[in-house]
């Protein structure tokens, strides 16, 4: 039974999350573009918003890029330039710094959303849930650091990379690579997949929008009424 649960969570559930991510995002963009926004609460209160946003976005951008490159780059492409142990230490140091930034920013944003009555009243349950899940995911990521340090040969890091690469290339046996992984890594992966599953139904979709149309658009000319008189 335990083997079946493991195979489902890390062999089947990733595809459920990815289908929800891509299909749900496409449907929402097609049918509910008016809800495709960050829904800023700055108009209600700007206390703590700037510093929280800066810390969170700095942290999350570096973490996302680090996970994307670190997990999806085959070992054969970088083994001639950097050893797996060195890559793991680089990921621990850089990821740890980015994780602390993101965790501080999310703590500020979460306490602001829950502690401010006006903001809390205008927040949907899903807004609060996704913010809490991101905060929890950041915390789990920081907790993985001492576990990673205990694996000096970087075997667990390589196994996690093999799992991710097998999932995205639709190869069988992906779950087997992390069968013996520490519990904290499994929790981190499961929560990350759950965030991807919920992504299309939250305000996180705004991260996919790039204001490219504004670049070639002619400048808007504004004339005051007094000038016309």
Image: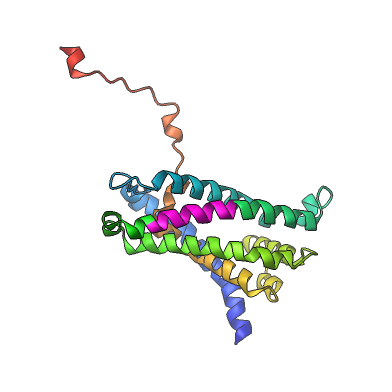
Q: Quadrant of the N terminus?
A: bottom right
Q: In this view, does 7 lie to the left or right of 213?
A: right
Q: In the picture, residue 100 is in which quadrant?
A: bottom right
Reply yes or no: does residue 101 show up in magenta: yes
Residue situated furthest right in the rendering: 80
Residue situated furthest left in the rendering: 229
Q: Which secondary structure dominates the residues rendered in magenta?
A: helix
Mark yes or no: residue 101 visible: yes
The total of numbered circles placed on residues is 0
> Looking at the image, which is closer to me, 69 or 46?
46
Question: Where is 162 relative to 2, above or below?
Answer: above
Residue 124 image point, x, y percent: 31, 60
In the image, what residue occupies the spot 70% across and 76% down?
180
Q: Quadrant of the C terminus?
A: top left
> Looking at the image, which is closer to me, 215 or 127?
127
Residue 90 image point, x, y percent: 72, 52
In the image, what residue occupies the spot 38% across and 22% down?
218
In the image, what residue occupies the spot 54% across and 60% down?
138
Look at the image and give the residue range highlighted in magenta: 98-111
């Amino acid at each position: 039974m335990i083997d079946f649960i493991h195979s489902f969570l890390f062999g089947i559930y990733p595809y459920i999350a990815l289908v929800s991510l891509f299909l749900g995002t496409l449907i929402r963009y097609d049918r509910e573009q008016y809800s495709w926004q960050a829904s800023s609460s700055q108009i209600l209160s700007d206390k703590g918003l700037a510093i929280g946003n800066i810390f969170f976005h700095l942290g999350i951008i570096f973490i996302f890029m680090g996970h994307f490159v670190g997990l999806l780059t085959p070992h054969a492409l970088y083994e001639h330039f950097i050893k797996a142990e060195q890559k793991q230490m680089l990921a621990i140091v850089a990821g740890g710094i980015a994780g602390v930034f993101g965790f501080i920013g999310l703590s500020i944003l979460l306490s602001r959303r829950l502690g401010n009555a006006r903001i809390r009243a205008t927040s949907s349950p899903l807004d609060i849930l996704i913010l809490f899940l991101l905060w929890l995911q950041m915390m789990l990521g920081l907790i993985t650091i001492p576990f990673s340090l205990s694996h000096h040969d970087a075997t667990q890091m390589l196994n996690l990379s093999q799992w991710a690469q097998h999932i995205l290339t639709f190869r069988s046996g992906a779950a087997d690579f992390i069968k013996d992984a520490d519990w904290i890594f499994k929790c981190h992966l499961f929560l990350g997949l759950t965030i991807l599953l919920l992504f299309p139904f939250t305000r996180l979709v705004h991260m996919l929008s790039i204001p490219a149309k504004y670049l070639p658009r002619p400048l808007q000319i504004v004339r005051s009424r007094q000038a016309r008189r």
